[in-house]
Amino acid sequence: MLIRWSAAAATAMMLSNPVLLQGASAADKPTDPQIAHIAYTAGVIDINAAKQAQKKAKNKDVKAFAEDMLRDHEAVNKQALALVKKLNVTPEDNETSKALSKQAADKMAELDKLDGAAFDKAYVANEVAYHKAVNGALETQLIPSASNAELKSLLQTGLKIFQGHQQHAEHIAAELK
């Protein structure tokens, strides 16, 4: 459950052309179980991307960034898993989480073909785009749609952490040019 939620979140972060809740209307407002799944999936996606970067990255700053991503997203997903267990909520797979997972798999395959500085630049550029997408979805869709106060609070905490990730990735991207 939680692994899927992180994966969705991670996938969202990895996409340079994200579809995270694009075109969603009020009638399409995600439920708390769907939000939990999307958020967890997104986290898993970034965890997997960080693991890939730990193996392939050559730049020390990129490697350190990947270590931060792994640590932070695993911690947030652990909190999310504890919360859904406490609330007795089963995260619900949905079109958004499915799209995120597919796009993440495609992006991971694309990045896997790169090495050295080309990988480093592409990974960091993807992290910038992914965090922008996830942060935007958290602000405009997921947090406002969450009904449960504890879920909303966890999402708000995650947003603050992920905004820091975006700034960090933007800084590294500027250094790699």
Image: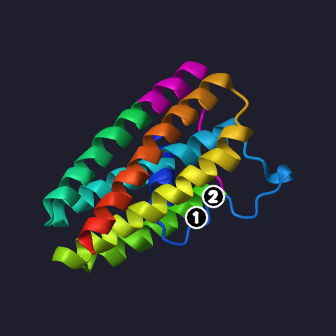
Residue 69 position in % (x across, y down):
32, 48
Colour scheme of the rendered structure: rainbow
Where 76 sits versus 132, above or below? above
Residue 17 position in % (x across, y down):
54, 72
Q: Is residue 128 left or right of residue 84?
A: left
Per the rendering, the mark at residue 99 is 1
Magenta highlight on residue 108: no
- Badge 1 amino acid: Ala
Give the structural element (helix, strand or loop) at label 1. helix
Per the rendering, the mark at residue 171 is none
Instruction: From the image, tell me which residue sits under label 2.
Output: 96
Look at 47% across and 55% down and name the residue there.
131
Is there a contact, CB below 8 Å, between mark 2 and mark 1? yes
Residue 92 visible in the shown view: no
Look at 54% across and 53% down and name the residue there.
134
Where 16 sits versus 8, above or below? below
CA gap, disc 2 to disc 1?
5 Å
Q: Quadrant of residue 124?
A: bottom left
Magenta highlight on residue 86: yes
**How dense is the environment of label 1, judged by Cα within 10 Å: few (below 14), some, or many (20 and up)?**
some
Residue 125 position in % (x across, y down):
38, 69
Where 153 sits versus 95, above or below? above
Look at 65% across and 53% down and name the residue there.
94
Q: Is residue 54 left or right of residue 89?
A: left
- Badge 2 amino acid: Thr
Query: What residue span does the magenta drawing correspond to?
Result: 79-94
Depth check, front residue: 70 or 139: 139
Q: State the quadrant of the C terminus.
A: bottom left
Q: Quadrant of residue 56?
A: bottom left
Give the structural element (helix, strand or loop) at label 2. helix
Q: Is residue 39 left or right of residue 107?
A: right
Residue 61 position in % (x across, y down):
19, 57
